Image (cartoon, grey):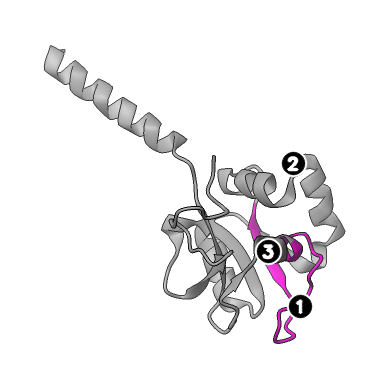
Amino acid sequence: MSIGRRIWLLLLLTAMLAASCEARQLAVIVDKTNNTGGLSTMDLAKVFKFDSHKWPDGRPVILVLRDPSTPEMKTAIEKLYHMQVEEFKSLLAAHASGVIIVRSEDELLKSVEAIPGAVGLVDVYSINSRVNVLKVDGKLPLEQGYFLKGN
């Protein structure tokens, strides 16, 4: 293999490694009929910790989440829940009627879109026009100081 090809492969592998280690930013999404424009960090934590069971319009809050072992949920567990994964799983089990666990970002997006009152967390690059993105402390994902930026 030529030196030029080796350098090219090394650069490619370095870029792939950097991309896989890149911090994830999560977006808080709700169904299109939800008129909530944003939440404070404290109110967001209440929603995701099952302390706030209804939206301002009276609809029940339904959490749509990925499996706790996914990178997205590891960020959420750290930032929102301040728990270990096993503690988090116990919390979910105690509130099983208010949470739906999905296998993929696409399934999460479709569930939030279809279920009135649903709220979920997705990687910012998975957002589509069929859901609304909530501001957290007045900031949208990718804005400086956004709360749910991964480490």
Q: x, y percentage for residue 33?
A: 57, 84
Q: The disc labelled 3 sits on which kind of residue?
A: Leu
**Which residue position is annotated with label 2?**
85
Give the CA separation, mark 2 to mark 1.
25 Å
Q: Quadrant of the N terminus?
A: top left
Give the CA separation, mark 2 to mark 3.
19 Å
Front residue of 8 and 47: 47
**Which residue position is annotated with label 1?**
54
Q: Picture quarter containing residue 111?
A: bottom right
Q: Secondary structure at mark 3?
A: helix
Crowdedness near tag 1: few (<14), some (14–19) or many (≥20) residues, C-alpha within 10 Å: some
Crowdedness near tag 3: few (<14), some (14–19) or many (≥20) residues, C-alpha within 10 Å: some
Q: The disc labelled 2 sits on which kind of residue?
A: Val
Q: Secondary structure at mark 2?
A: helix
Q: Magenta residues: mostly which secondary structure?
A: loop
Is residue 68 among what the camera can see? Answer: no
* In front: label 2 or label 1: 1
Crowdedness near tag 2: few (<14), some (14–19) or many (≥20) residues, C-alpha within 10 Å: some
Q: Earlier in the sequence, mark 1 or mark 3?
A: 3
The range drawn in magenta is 46-66
**Which residue position is annotated with label 3?**
44
The residue depicted at 54 percent of the width and 44 percent of the height is 150
